[in-house]
Amino acid sequence: MASAFHAVEASGIARFMREALYAYPAVEAAHIAGLALLFGSIAIVDLRLLGLGRRVPLSPLIEFAVPWSIGGFVLAALTGSLMLTAHVEEFFDQPLFWLKMALIATAGANAVALRRGALRTASTVLDAAPSARVRLAAGLSLALWTAVIACGRMLAYF
Ligand code: HEM
């Protein structure tokens, strides 16, 4: 396994990420733009699902927000993976990195379950009053993505 990590770290892209002066900070800035897009678009929908801004119709809001959430996630995942290649062994040794990955998987599963389940069947009802189940999933979503951001930020300090 260690030799696989070394092979990744010795690759051209990993060396470029470590050695080019602006590569890491530029990719990190794009990572932040991606997560801002992801978290921003998800938070607006979650707040609406929690019962705020009831004047805003839910279906067009979801239709508009979801592609931006997916785009933000793809950007965050691509740039995150690029940064990972630079110091793969170090990151893989960090429990915080794995906690962040587990939180991303849980938050992603929560989003998919919400979209496929409660949101699909109950969108007309939601325009009146979100059910307790939907509000719970929306609150969980906000908490999980916030925890992902906290783990990402803390990685630099451990
Ligand atoms: C597969 C997906 C992802 C991977 C592989 C990944 C990986 C990384 C890596 C390697 C770093 C650099 C840490 C450092 O240099 O100390 C980082 C930073 C960070 N990540 Fe991710 N990440 C991913 C997705 C996300 C998502 C979805 C979010 C938030 C919703 C997020 C939030 C952050 C934050 C806040 C930072 C710190 C940025 C800074 O302090 O400048 N990451 N990530």
Image: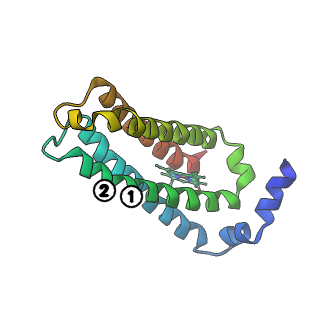
Which label lies toward us, 2 or 1? Answer: 2
Across and down, in percent, residue 72 comes to 44, 58
| 126 lies left or right of 155 | left
Look at mark 2 in the image and give the residue it sits on.
64
Q: Residue at 63% across / 40% down in the picture? A: 98
Residue occupying the point 53% across, 48% down:
152
Amino acid at dot 1: Trp
Crowding near pointer 2: few (<14 within 10 Å), some, many (20+)?
few
What number is the disc on residue 68? 1
**Cα gap from disc 2 to disc 1, whole angstroms:** 7 Å
Residue furthest out toward the left: 55
Residue 40 visible, this angle: no
**Residue 59 visible at all:** yes
Judged from the image, the secondary structure of the residue bearing numbered disc 2 is helix
Q: Residue at x 70, y 57 (%)?
A: 87
Which of the 4 image quadrants contains residue 129? top left
The spot of residue 148 in percent (x, y) is: 49, 43
Whether label 2 touches label 1, CB < 8 Å: yes
